[in-house]
């Protein structure tokens, strides 16, 4: 019997992505994998059922989960979905390992092997599986378009019969994947761009994209490609330098996030007050509480003429390409587990071991296990 991989329709309101696109389903079919697609799963990302010619379309959700050896999804399972998953099956998706602790406990108790794509180690051979990077690239690009839409100014310099229009000034805070993509996009639109990151090693990357690096003379390299938390003295130094650049900016885009921790507060209310009326802040760290003190997750608000927007699930706004990139990440993650037509995860493989959230009735990810056991005690 072939391996059966199920792709459910996402149920989280506003989630438009789908875990597999038709092209990737065809590639799995060549590996003798049978893909079961819940009817309508790809519609929100503009992939109708009839394009999934290599999948079996399933209309009954209970049957979908009952038959599945592996479930590939974007979002974590809902409480209803958890009750339908077959014991011993595999669930792969974005599982929010530092948040939705109750559903993680349920995965453990139901003996579901789950892999959180956020936990895929950021090593060279796993780059093709790096969901965080692929989706962050989408978010960084879209953030600039959101800013341009909210701004009352042109981004490029224009020479017109009515005079010369000066280019917009854009400040990008955070030079990870999202920040670098935002810098590149703002530059393509013709803006004058400055980039900032507490990691001094990003200076060359920022400048290679044609932006000016804001240097505050603090290096805060951490582990896993992330920044460490700044000391109070370093935060004061950071804000003193940033305040001048942000006050002159027409657009500020913030992207600084720390996995498992609240987003660092970089822009206090006083700094927003110092900005020009008509300026725009796009806070991509809104899901973690925001980099701006005034950010309200999912809301657009006005503060003395400055627009502050903290969008949620930004990759879902570009569902076609976000789904394509996500699906290819999943394909590259799942393929090594398939050996001679059977599911055979290699638990000695760093990628498999480190990304496992639950397995064999245990929470395998130590930080999450500590959180759950701490809650239970």
Image (tube, rainbow, N blue to C red):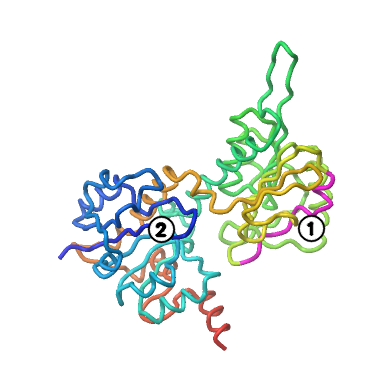
Query: Is 375 a magenta residue?
Result: no
Q: Around disc 2, counting alpha carbons within 10 Å, would you say few (fewer than 14), some (14 to 19), or many (20 or more)?
A: many
Residue at 75% x, 14% y: name it.
163
Residue 21: x and y in percent read 33, 48
The first of marks 1 and 2 along the sequence is 2
Is disc 2 placed on a helix, strand or loop?
loop
Residue 10 is tagged as 2
Query: Is 269 a magenta residue?
Result: yes
Residue 60: x and y in percent read 27, 63
Magenta: main secondary structure equals: loop
Residue 354: x and y in percent read 44, 68
Q: What residue did someone put label 1 on?
A: 235
- Looking at the image, the residue that sits furthest to the front is 59
Dot in front, 1 or 2: 2
Left or right, 202 with respect to 37, comes to right
Stretch of the chain drawn in magenta: 261-274
38 vs 291, nearest the viewer: 38
Residue 83 in which image quadrant? bottom left
Left or right, 264 with respect to 54, comes to right
State the quadrant of the C terminus: bottom right
Left or right, 72 with respect to 174, comes to left
Please determine whether, in this image, residue 328 is positioned above or below residue 162: below
Please determine whether, in this image, residue 341 is positioned above or below residue 173: below
239 vs 218, nearest the viewer: 239
Residue at 75% x, 39% y: name it.
279
């Amino acid at each position: 019997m072939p391996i059966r991989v199920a792709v459910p329709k996402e149920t989280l309101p506003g989630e438009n992505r789908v875990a597999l696109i038709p092209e990737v389903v065809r590639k799995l079919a060549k590996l003798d994998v049978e893909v079961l697609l819940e009817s309508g799963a790809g519609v929100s990302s503009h992939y109708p059922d009839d394009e999934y010619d290599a999948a079996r379309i399933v209309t009954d959700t209970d049957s979908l989960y009952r038959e599945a050896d592996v479930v590939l999804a974007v979002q974590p399972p809902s409480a209803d979905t958890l009750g339908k998953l077959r014991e011993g099956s595999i669930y792969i998706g974005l599982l929010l390992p530092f948040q939705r602790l109750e559903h993680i406990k349920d995965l453990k108790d139901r003996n579901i092997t789950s892999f959180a794509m956020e936990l895929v180690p950021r090593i060279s051979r796993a780059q093709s599986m790096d969901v965080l990077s692929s989706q962050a690239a989408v978010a960084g690009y879209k953030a600039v378009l959101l800013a341009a839409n909210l701004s009352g100014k042109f981004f490029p310099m224009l020479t017109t019969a009515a005079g010369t229009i000066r280019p917009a000034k854009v400040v990008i805070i955070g030079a990870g994947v999202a920040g670098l993509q935002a810098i590149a996009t703002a530059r393509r639109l013709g803006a004058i761009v400055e980039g900032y990151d507490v990691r001094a090693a990003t200076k060359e990357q920022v400048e290679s994209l044609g932006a000016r690096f804001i240097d505050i003379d603090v290096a805060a390299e951490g582990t896993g490609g992330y920044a460490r938390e700044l000391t109070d003295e370093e935060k004061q130094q950071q804000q003193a330098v940033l305040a001048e650049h942000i006050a002159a900016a027409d657009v500020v885009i913030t992207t600084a996030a720390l996995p498992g921790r609240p987003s660092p507060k970089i822009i206090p209310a006083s700094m927003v007050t110092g900005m020009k009326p008509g300026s725009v802040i796009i806070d991509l760290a809104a899901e973690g509480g925001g980099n701006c003190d005034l950010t309200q997750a999912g809301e657009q608000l006005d503060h003395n003429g400055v627009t502050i927007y903290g969008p949620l699930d930004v990759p879902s706004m570009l569902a076609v390409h976000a789904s394509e990139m996500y699906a290819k990440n999943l394909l590259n993650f799942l393929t090594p587990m398939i050996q001679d037509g059977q599911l055979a995860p290699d638990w000695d493989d760093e990628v498999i071991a480190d990304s496992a959230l639950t397995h064999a009735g245990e929470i395998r990810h130590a930080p999450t296990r500590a959180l759950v056991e701490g809650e239970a005690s």
